[in-house]
Image (cartoon, helix red, strand yellow):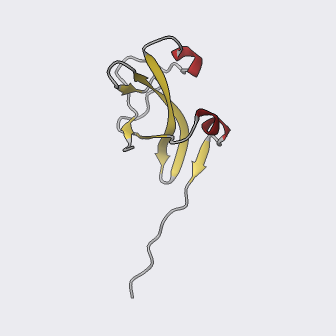
Amino acid sequence: MPPQSASGPPGTGAVPLEPSTAQDSDVCVIRGWLVSAVAILDKHSIVEDIRTGRRFNVTPRAAGTPFFQHPGSAEEFDRLPAQISLPVYTPAAQS
């Protein structure tokens, strides 16, 4: 899945959303990763409107912050660390 923008609609406020908040409603929690710095992924969740498919972040970060949906299960996601540092790729010098 391509990265999504993690910026939410104006005025949503910084209200953390727990998965239980979305039960029996028209939204669902999408677990994933924000790219917060070069090669740093921060665990994060956004909300999807089930009717429209529109995704928004109830704890907005800078506009355009890339968000990547976690491809595994919620249980797997919950066991992962809050932050992951990826190795930086440096291409070999051409001779």
Left or right: where 34 falls relative to 7: right
Q: Residue furthest left?
A: 52
Q: Nearer the viewer, residue 15 or 49?
A: 49
Q: Residue furthest bottom?
A: 95
Q: Looking at the image, is 48 positioned above or below residue 21?
A: below
Q: Residue furthest right?
A: 79
- Split into 4 quadrants, where in the image is the N terminus? top left
Instruction: State which quadrant residue 86 falls in.
Output: bottom right
One can see residue 90 in this view: yes
- Split into 4 quadrants, where in the image is the C terminus? bottom left
Residue occupying image coordinates x 54% and y 14%? 23
Residue 53: x percent and y percent? 34, 25
Residue occupying image coordinates x 32% and y 21%? 52
Q: Looking at the image, is 78 positioned above or below residue 95?
A: above
Residue occupying image coordinates x 48% and y 66%? 89
Q: Looking at the image, is 32 positioned above or below residue 57?
A: below
Residue 10: x percent and y percent? 34, 20
One can see residue 18 in this view: no
Residue 30: x percent and y percent? 48, 30
Residue 54: x percent and y percent? 34, 25
Q: Nearer the viewer, residue 86 or 30?
A: 30
Q: Nearer the viewer, residue 63 or 25?
A: 25
Q: Looking at the image, is 12 positioned above or below residue 86?
A: above
Residue occupying image coordinates x 43% and y 28%? 60
Tag count = 0
Left or right: where 65 falls relative to 89: left
